[in-house]
Image: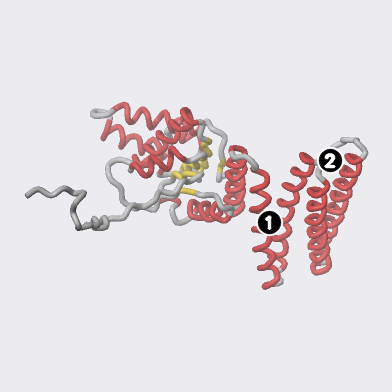
Amino acid sequence: MAYSSSSSSFNITPPPPLFPKISVENYDVFLSFRGEDTRYSFTSHLHAALSRLKVRTYIDYELERGDEISPALIKAIEEAKVSVVVLSQNYASSRWCLDELVKIMECKRTKGQIVVPIFYHIEPTHVRHQTGSYANAFACHDRRFMATDPNKVLRWRLALSEVANLSGWDCLVTRMESELVERIAIDVLQKLDSINNGGIESRIATYKQMAQAKLEKCLRTGNLNDMEDLTETLQQLANLKLDKALRTDDDKDWEELDVTNQRILQLKQQKLIRSGNPKALEDYTATQHQIAQINAERENRRRGIYRGI
């Protein structure tokens, strides 16, 4: 006797899959780096700085890989708006890094992706012309691939030359690595904001969150260094608010800027009282003068006069 599925009294539920499907998050930034060089130092600090700024960043923590970069890596590169390439001493010795770089430069050409090179204790000319440690790496690549896949080695060389000609960051120029990491993270955030609509609003919101966290720390510790750190963040926030106020000419934006400026002035006055340092007095006076200039510009704009600050 035949039974049709529509007349069956049994409702069989299929078993759950052995490996549930994992959703893949979309990332704004792709980090390309040589693990053994910077995984636990520069790159980890940069990733932490980007995370603090709420930048969704893809970082590959895999220590072992197959012969080719995975589809997940390719997808992350293709969907990223910005790729940050940490070019270190041994970057060129990794064929996976070089394959990533080829894909990144392809996305730059075809998708308009922004690429930010970081020359980490390596001369840009060594990257551009594959000299120094990069020459040693390519001597090994030539022996392995030139007979079977010479185009692969050529693509790697061209990608390195191309990325080295881009405007980037040279770690040999900036002494303080912590300062460099923060500057790079902010630069990446600004590049993302230039791509997305309402960029200045998101930056203001981010710096407000950062300032709040640093204020809470400052209140806990009472440390002068923490106070200076808070003041610096508020100054960056004030610069963004000034930029917005100059664009909109809205009284509300000018008032919010003035609130931040007055808080900065109070903090610098506290520093002057606590330290008695002549430089603190000079900084406090300069801030007073700057705020006066901003207020004068606001008043001029009310009168229809645009002189600029």
Q: Residues within 10 Å of mark 2 (few under 14, many from 20)?
A: few
Q: Residues within 10 Å of mark 1 (few under 14, many from 20)?
A: some
Estimate the x, y position of residue 274 in percent, counting from the top left: 80, 69
Labels 2 & 1 near each other (Cβ < 8 A): no
Q: How many marks?
A: 2
Estimate the x, y position of residue 200 in percent, counting from the top left: 67, 44
Colour approach in the figure: secondary structure
In the image, residue 278 sits, relative to residue 161, either above or below, namely below
Estimate the x, y position of residue 283 in percent, counting from the top left: 82, 55
Query: Outermost residue, right direction?
Result: 303
Residue at 51 percent of width and 39 percent of height: 81
In the image, residue 146 sits, relative to residue 177, either above or below, namely above
Residue 35 seen anywhere in this rendered image of the structure: no
What SS does tag 1 mark? helix
Residue at 18 percent of width and 49 percent of height: 5
Near-viewer residue (178 or 49)? 49
Residue at 82 percent of width and 52 percent of height: 255
Q: Which residue position is annotated with label 1?
A: 208
What SS does tag 2 mark? loop
Q: Which residue position is annotated with label 2?
A: 309
Q: CA distance from mark 2 to mark 1?
A: 24 Å
- Quadrant in which the C terminus appears: top right
Side of 13 where 129 appears, left or right: right
Near-viewer residue (10 or 114)? 10
Q: Amino acid at mark 1?
A: Lys
Near-viewer residue (106 or 232)? 106
Side of 144 where 261 appears, left or right: right
Q: Amino acid at mark 2?
A: Ile
Q: Which mark is residue 159?
A: none
Near-viewer residue (3 or 132)? 3
